Image (cartoon, rainbow, N blue to C red):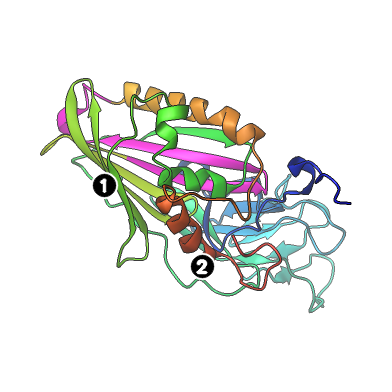
Amino acid sequence: MELIAVCDSKTNTAPDFPIGWWSVARSHELEPGDVKSVSALDRELVVYRTDSGEARVHDAFCPHLGAHLGVNGKVVGESIQCPFHGWQFGGDGKCNHIPYCETIPSRAKVQNWPVSEVNGEIYMWFHPTGADPDREVPIIEQIGDEHWTEPRQVEFNIPVHIQDIAENSCDPEHFQYVHKQNQTPPSSVEVEDDGAVHLRSEIEAQGMKGDLHATMFQPGLARVMTSYGPGAEMLVYNSAQPISRNETLLRWTLIVRNEIAEFVGDQVMDGIIEGLSDDYPIWENKVHRKQPIFCKGDETLVLFRKWVRQFYLPESPRGQQ
């Protein structure tokens, strides 16, 4: 006798965290000497900027008696000082000063995470084995360019794993049903020579036809360029901070060419918010399908699932996505 399966919500588990660069703060949020407590990747982190201006990310809990370095911790020169007993930790995570003891235990250190600061954001590199970065954060050259506007920025907490959010970019069929478009927009999705997923589509907004080109560098790092002609372009950059396997903080940055600054901007950001509002009930109530049943019309989703495997360890129990 075969029993009915247990409800999927009780058995389906979200994937591990993908290997890659993850946004943990915007640069303007961290002045020299500032200390910030951040939750990411199921970890508590301390993010701080040294007196010389270098951003650093460590695990938050002091190896001495477990105080949180991000709560009342203090920057001392190029080190972070524990608020409990004054132990200090340098850029490599090792304790370099104990105010009441000359001998420093060899095991007195916190996990240090490689950091990159570009695109107006601070990123940490995550690899489950602690391996060094094997790629750089893609630089969005238009951010800070004099021909483009100052960034408009917005953030959202989304109750779903980062992979499920990224998968939306390779799912043109859902636009007709979730976003109430009249039909599925003509589009192509391919993995190109740079290793990224590229989606190209023809769009129409307020009677104007344009071309959309979305580039996904990794789950959680994507650039969307929309062009309505020379000098009529806008760019949306999306970075992610996975808080847990079921919660993701999305950071969106919007810039447009100066030539069209007075015509677009706020309404585009409103459109992003509206689009995420459409997706939110799906994300909030779905389960992650490790082995979904695809049909012949799901070619782009199959492509995404094959592409995303490279960001997980093959031997991980949840690494086959």
Against 278, residue 82 (above or below) is below
Question: What label sits on residue 91 in the rendered view?
Answer: none
* Residue receiving disc 2: 310
In the image, the segment drawn in magenta is: 236-264
Query: Percent from the top left, x then y, of residue 190?
Result: 33, 57
Q: Is residue 260 magenta?
A: yes
**In front of the other: 279 or 139:** 279
* In this view, the mark in front (2 or 1): 2
Amino acid type at image mark 1? Gln
**Residue 26: in sight, yes or no?**
no
Nearer to me, 50 or 140 = 140
Seen from this angle, which residue lies furthest front? 1
The residue carrying mark 1 is: 142
Q: What is the secondary structure assignment of the residue under circle 2? A: helix
User: Residue 174 at what x, y percent from top left?
Assistant: 45, 35
Residue 307 visible in the snapshot = yes
Q: Residues within 10 Å of mark 2 (few under 14, many from 20)?
A: some
Name the foreground residue: 218 vs 135: 218
Q: Position of residue 72 (x, y in %)?
A: 73, 45
Which residue is pictured at 56% across the width and 30% down the height? 280
Where is residue 60? Give x, y as percent. 72, 55
Q: CA distance from mark 2 to mark 1?
A: 28 Å
> Could you tell me which residue is drawn at 79 percent across and 60 percent down?
62
Which one is earlier in the sequence, the residue at label 2 or at label 1? Answer: 1
In this image, 186 relative to 282: left or right? left
